[in-house]
Image (tube, rainbow, N blue to C red):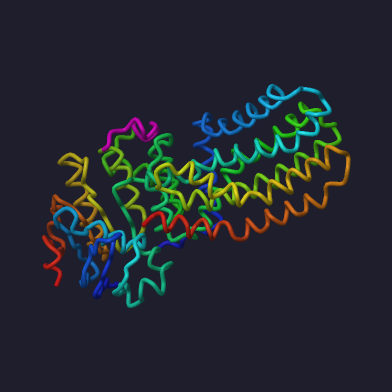
Amino acid sequence: MPDLSIQHLHVWRGERHVLRDLSLVLPAGQALQLLWANGVGKTSLLRTLAGFLHAEAGEVRWDGRGLRDDGSTWHRDIAWLGHELALKGDLTPLENLAFAVGLRRRVTTPTLAAALTGAGLHPAFHGEATRHLSAGQQRRVALARLALWDARLWLLDEPASNLDAAGQRFVAEVVAAHLRGGGSAIIATHQPLALEGVPHRLSTSVADLA
Amino acid sequence: MTPLPSTFSAAARVLRRDLTLAVRRAGDWLQPVAFFVIVLLLFPLALDPEPARLRLLAPAALWIAVLLSSVLATDFLFREDGRDGTLELFAVSGQSFAGLLFAKTAAHWLLTGLPLALVSPLAALSFGAPAAALPGVLAAVLLGSLSLSLLGAVGAGLTLGLRRAGALLSLLVLPLAIPTLIFGARATALAIGGEDASAALYLLGALAVFGLTLAPLAAAAAVRISLE
C-alpha cells in the first residue's frame, strides 16, 4: 500500500505564504486530522494535494512517484470532498450519485441506492430533487459518493459540517472503514472525528507535523 | 481497483447529464434563442422595412445576432459547475479534464448553437431571402456557431470565478470571433445573392476544425487556472 510523503512544501496564495516548508509522511492505513486554526492553510494543503493549487517549491510523492511527474495516476488514487458538494439541485440524489460515480467506475442502480441508504438517506428521498433536501442530507449524498469513489487517499475538507450527531458518527465510520481497508485520509476539520480503533493522528498546528 | 471507464464513456455521461438538466430548466437555454429572435425583429422596426434593403442587411443582422446570442449563452457555460464544485470533481476524476469540458461545450452547442442555426433560415426568410439560400444560411450558422461555442469555452474558462465576468467575457471573445463573423456573413450574403458560397463555408469549416483541435485543451488549461 502506498505512503504519502510531502517534503519542504511551500505554497503561496497571492501575497500570502500560507504553507512554509511543510513536511509530513502519512503511511497507508492512517488518517491525519488537521485541527489548525482558521487561515493557517488546512484547505490550501488539501487543495494543493488535490492538484488545484500549485506549490512553488517542495515535493509530494505518492507510492514512490512524484505528483508533478504522474498527475493522472495521482488523480486516479484520490477522492476529494470540499466545501462545495458537486451536486445538482435539479437532479435526484440517485442521479447525482450515478453521474459522479460513473466517471470512476461502473456501478448498478441497486448499489447506488444501497449506498445512499447506508449514508442515512431514506429511500423516500432517493427520487426527490436534491434541492429539496436539507444541507445535512445533501452532505450524506456526497459522503455516499466518497464511499463508492474507489480511491486510496481521501482528502476531506470539513466533511462533517451541517451533520447531526448521527451524521458525524457516520462520517467517522466511513473513514474508519476506509482506513481498515488500507486507505489513507487527510481531514481538515474543527471537530475531530471519533476514529476509534484505527490508526490516526491529530495535528493542532503546523509545528506538530515536524 | 476497478478499471476507469473510457474518456468517451465519461464524456457521454457529462453530455447526457447536461442535456437532462437543460430539459428540466428549459428557460436557461431558451434565453439565447429568444434574444436572437428579438434582436432580429428590431432591425425592420428601426430601419425602413423595404424588402430589397432588408435582404441587403440580412447577413449583417443575422450574424451580429448570432454573435451576441452566443456570447450571452457562453456566460453560463462553466459558471454553475464552477460554483457547485462539479469542476473540482471533474479535475480529480482521473478522466481527461479536456475531454469532460469538451463534452460540456458540445452540450452547450447542442442547446444554443444548434437552435440558433435551426432558427436562422426562418430569420433569413423574414428578411426576404429566397428559399434557395436557406441551406447555405443553415450551413454557415451551423459551422459558425460551433466555432463560437468553442471559442466561448476558452473565454468562459478564463473568466470563471471573476466578478462581472459577463462584460469581460464579451471583451475577450468578440474580437477573436471576428474571422467567424466575416466568413459567416460572407457565406450568408453569397447564399442570399444566389452565388456559390462554398469557399466561405470551407473557411468556416476550417475555423471549426481549428477550434475543435485546440479549444478543449485551452479551455481545460484556463479552467485549471480558475480553480486555484
Find residue A55 and report its horizontal and vertical position in percent: 32, 68
Above or below, A91 against A67 in this view is: above
Q: Can residue A105 be seen in this view?
A: no
- Quadrant hosting residue B46: top right
Q: Which of A164 and B29 is in front in this view?
A: B29
Is residue B31 on the magenta stretch?
Answer: no
Q: Which residue is drawn at 52% across and 56% down?
A: B219
Q: For the point 19% across and 55% down, which residue is it?
A: A39
Q: Identify which residue is drawn at 78% across, 45% down.
A: B187
- The residue nearer to you, when weighing B53 against B145, is B53
Judged left or right of residue B105, residue A203 is left
Residue A141 visible to the viewer? yes
Residue B126 on image: x %, y %: 76, 26
Which quadrant holds the C terminus of chain A? bottom left
Q: Position of residue B49 (x, y in %)?
A: 76, 22
- Boundaries of the magenta span: A125-135
Left of B10 or right of it: where is B227? left
Give the left or right position of residue A35, taking residue B228 as reference: left
Magenta span has A128? Answer: yes
Most extreme residue toward the bottom, as rendered? A64
Image-based side of B22 in relation to A136, left or right: right
Q: Residue at x 30, y 74 (%)?
A: A59
Q: Say which of A6 and B71 sits in front.
A: B71
Position of residue A179 relative to residue B178, above or below, is below
The quarter of the rendered structure image containing the N terminus of chain A is bottom left
Q: In which quarter of the image is residue A141?
A: top left
Where residue B16 appears, x then y in whole percent?
54, 43
Number of marks drawn? 0
